Amino acid sequence: ILGGDDLDAPITETVRRLHMLASCGKPIDIAIFPRAEHGIYEYETAADGSRLSTRNSEGYFAMMRDYILEGRLWRTYGSSVVHLSSR
């Protein structure tokens, strides 16, 4: 589960490596919340460019619950974009 706008840990390299593992047959699921930063926090941008975290993205906690309890993602989770591995 990644925040698409994460400045602390930008996701480009992480996503590249996860796709590489998935292409090798590893069971990798990737979920990206596009307007979220580190910790899956949505934010507002101030006039000076700084960010003010406002809340966790809708669907984030449901996504974690489903994956923990069922080992899979099976529905829509807010604005997330989910890439499921073929198992």
Image: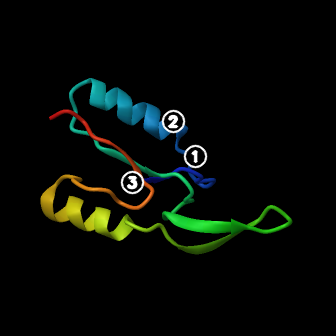
Asked whether disc 3 touches disc 1, contact meaning CB atoms under 8 Å apart, the reply is no
Nearer the viewer's eye, disc 3 or disc 2? 3
Identify the element where label 3 is drawn: loop
Residue bearing mark 1: 10
Q: How many numbered discs, if any?
A: 3
User: Looking at the image, is mark 3 or mark 1 earlier in the sequence?
Assistant: 3
Q: Which residue is mark 3?
A: 1
Quadrant housing residue 83 = top left
* In the depicted structure, whether residue 44 falls above or below residue 6: below
Q: Is residue 35 above or below residue 51?
A: above
Residue at 15% across, 35% down: 87
Q: Amino acid at mark 3?
A: Ile
Secondary-structure class at tag 1:
loop
Residue neighbourhood size for the residue with mark 2, other residues' Cα within 10 Å, grouped as few (<14), some (14–19), many (≥20): few
Q: Amino acid at mark 1?
A: Pro
Q: Residue furthest bottom?
A: 54
| Residue 80 as seen in the image, left or right of residue 84 | right
Residue 46: percent from left, percent from top: 79, 68
